[in-house]
Amino acid sequence: MEGWDVLVSDTGPLISLESLPTGFQWIRSVLDRLIIPPTVLDEAAHPYEERQAFLEEAGLRRLIDVRRPETRSKADPGSGWHVLDEGEQEAISLARELEYPLLIEETAAAWLEASDVRSQEPLG
C-alpha cells in the first residue's frame, strides 16, 4: 500500500483487522487516515454500547474520520448495486466523491466498483 496514506473503508476490512492480533496496530502504522461512513462505524461498533467505546478500545480514534457521502452513487438496475448493503453503498460513494482508494472485501461490491471505475473517464 505504498503511497496510500488515506483510504475509504467498508465494514468487512475493519472486522478482519479486528480479528488479527495486531490488525489495528498495523493499519495505524501504514495509514494517516481511514475514512468511513457513519453506517460503517455503526456496523463495526455493533458489539459495543457506544461508537466512541469501539474507537477508543481499538485505538482508532485518531485514525478514523467519519463522513457522510454528499450523494449516494447511482447505478443502473442491471449493475448489481441493489445487492450491496447501505454501508457498502456509502463507502463506494465516499471513495468516488473523495477520489481515494477503497478498502473493501465483498466480492460483489469489489466487482461492481471495479467495473464502474473502468467505465468512467480517467481522473485528472
Image: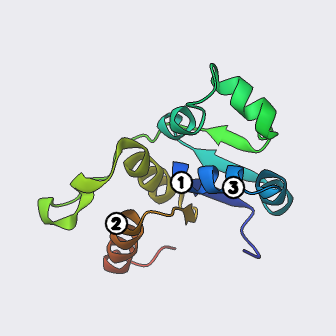
Q: CA distance from mark 1 to mark 3?
A: 9 Å
Is 35 drawn above or below residue 44 in the view shown?
below
Residue ranking furthest to the top: 49
Question: Residue 113: x percent and y percent?
Answer: 39, 68
Q: Say which residue appears at 60% left-offset and 33% top-offset.
A: 45
* The N terminus lies in quadrant: bottom right
* Left or right placement of residue 20 versus residue 49 in this view: right
Q: Say which residue appears at 43% left-offset and 56% top-offset.
A: 92
Going from N to C along the chain, the mark reached first, 1 or 3, is: 1
The amino acid at mark 2 is: Ala
Q: CA distance from mark 2 to mark 3?
A: 20 Å
Going from N to C along the chain, the mark reached first, 2 or 3, is: 3
The amino acid at mark 3 is: Leu
Q: Is residue 100 visible?
A: yes
Going from N to C along the chain, the mark reached first, 1 or 2, is: 1
Is 41 drawn above or below residue 13 in the view shown?
above
Question: Residue 69: x percent and y percent?
Answer: 45, 42
The residue singled out by tag 2 in the image is 108
Q: Residues within 10 Å of mark 2 (few under 14, many from 20)?
A: some
* Left or right placement of residue 52 versus residue 95 in this view: right
Question: Residue 83: x percent and y percent?
Answer: 25, 55
Q: Quadrant of residue 52?
A: top right
The residue singled out by tag 3 in the image is 17
Is 103 drawn above or below residue 89 in the view shown?
below
Colour theme: rainbow
Q: Residues within 10 Å of mark 3 (few under 14, many from 20)?
A: some
Is 101 drawn above or below residue 86 in the view shown?
below
Question: Residue 31: x percent and y percent?
Answer: 78, 59
